[in-house]
């Protein structure tokens, strides 16, 4: 009987070890595959669906994934490349895009507030994870620059503009609600207790309630807000719930599980079977994409609809940078968030 009990314990511990080992291997296989496809030797992340350009979004996403995977060496390489190629000392933010096929490589020095926010969030997490104040101080500096150059008060809201230039037209402002990175804002507030981050979080969720366009009451990728607080699809972009806006429920659900603002996304995705969900919809005309969601978009759908078991860190063969990134982030948000 004693031998049987000992055997059972050994078997139980063996199964537990095998389970966690397989989880770690699956996790590592996702990150290793991601790096092998999209990380250049100098630390640049390439957007494989966009002529291998690079942007702060990609560096920020990948810095987050490096922290989640406890990969400090890769984190440092990603951060250093961004500092060398994109950092603007005059404002303390980063130029948003690097094109290896053009001269100069950085033709547009405007920043993208989502990329800067992602990098600041990754740096803050890195400082905690690796007990290194260099990262923490760099995050604080980047957060301060974002507040100074990208955050405004408008129509009764605290608003994060998409960039330093081109989005504040005085009579109205243009926002990209997928730049409302709620979990980052929460992390900044928890660290500094600066009220601006809490205000952004509260204003962002309130603004989403007014970005209810068309039959399905969905936000568009870009939104124009008038001085009286009314909102409409931005005039300079297609009126689609598409590749930008799909990130909204990921960030919202990550920071605010069960938020009532998640309901429109759930209702829209319930209209189509999982494997035949269109990649985008024009919220004003009802026109849908003729192709279905990629694995990364599906991962956000699964995360939003509490179907975490369907999200895998194993990347689909030949899947591009953006889809792969969203898939891994959704997996972490589901399992570790």
Image: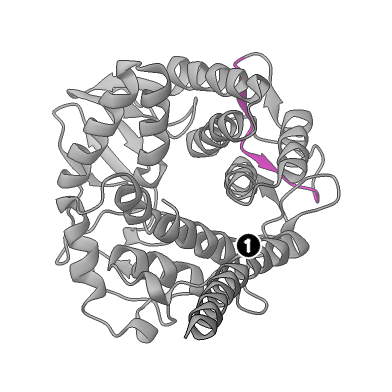
Is residue 160 highlighted in magenta? Answer: no
Residue 199, by quadrant, is top left
Residue found at x 76% / y 47%: 44
Which residue is the extreme one toward the right?
41
**Residue labelled with disc 1:** 321
Name above or below for residue 113 compared with residue 21: above
- Front-most of residues 95 and 188: 188
Residue found at x 36% / y 78%: 278
Residue found at x 41% / y 82%: 290
Residue 151, by quadrant, is top left
Q: How many marks?
A: 1
Which residue is the extreme one toward the front?
1
Q: What is the span of residues highlighted in magenta in the rendered image? A: 91-101
Q: Is residue 181 visible?
A: no
| Left or right of residue 227: residue 78 | right
- Colour pattern of the rendering: one colour
| Left or right of residue 66: residue 228 | left
Name above or below for residue 133 compared with residue 161: above
- Front-most of residues 56 and 77: 77
Q: Main secondary structure of the magenta part?
A: loop
Q: What x and y, as percent, mark residue 210?
A: 15, 44
Q: What x and y, as percent, mark residue 332?
A: 48, 57
Secondary structure under the numbered disc 1 in the rendered image:
helix
Neighbour class for label 1 at 10 Å: few (<14), some, many (≥20)? Answer: many
Name above or below for residue 11 compared with residue 145: below
- Front-most of residues 129 and 221: 129
Is residue 97 highlighted in magenta? Answer: yes
Q: What x and y, as percent, mark residue 149?
A: 47, 18
Q: What x and y, as percent, mark residue 333?
A: 42, 55
Q: Is residue 131 visible?
A: yes
């Amino acid at each position: 009987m004693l031998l049987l009990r000992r055997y059972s314990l050994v078997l139980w511990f063996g199964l537990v070890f095998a389970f966690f080992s397989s989880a770690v291997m699956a996790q590592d296989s996702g990150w290793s595959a991601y790096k092998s496809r999209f990380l250049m030797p100098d630390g640049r992340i390439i957007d494989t669906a966009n002529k291998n350009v690079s942007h702060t979004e990609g560096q920020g996403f990948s810095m987050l994934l490096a922290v989640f995977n406890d990969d400090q060496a890769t984190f440092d390489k990603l951060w250093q490349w961004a500092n060398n190629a994109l950092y603007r000392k005059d404002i303390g933010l980063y130029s948003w895009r690097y094109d290896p096929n053009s001269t100069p490589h950085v033709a547009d020095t405007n920043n993208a507030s989502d990329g800067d926010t992602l990098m600041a969030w990754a740096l803050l997490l890195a400082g905690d994870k690796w007990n290194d104040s260099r990262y923490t101080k760099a995050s604080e500096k980047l957060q301060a620059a974002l507040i100074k150059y990208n955050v405004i008060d408008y129509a009764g809201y605290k608003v994060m503009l998409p960039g330093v230039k081109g989005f504040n037209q005085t009579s109205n402002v243009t926002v990209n609600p997928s730049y409302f990175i709620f979990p980052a804002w929460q992390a900044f507030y928890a660290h500094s207790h600066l009220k601006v981050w809490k205000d952004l979080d509260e204003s962002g969720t309130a603004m989403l309630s007014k970005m209810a366009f068309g039959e399905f009451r969905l936000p568009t990728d870009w939104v124009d807000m008038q001085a009286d607080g009314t909102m409409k699809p931005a005039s300079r972009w297609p009126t689609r719930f598409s590749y930008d806006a799909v990130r909204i429920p990921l960030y919202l659900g990550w920071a605010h599980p069960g938020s009532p603002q998640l309901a429109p996304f759930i209702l829209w995705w319930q209209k189509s079977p999982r494997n035949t969900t269109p990649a985008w919809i024009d919220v004003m005309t009802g026109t849908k994409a003729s192709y279905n969601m990629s694995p990364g978009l599906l991962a956000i759908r699964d995360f939003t609809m509490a179907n975490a078991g369907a999200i895998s860190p194993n990347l689909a063969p030949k899947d591009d940078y953006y889809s792969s990134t969203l898939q891994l982030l959704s997996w972490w948000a589901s399992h570790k968030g």
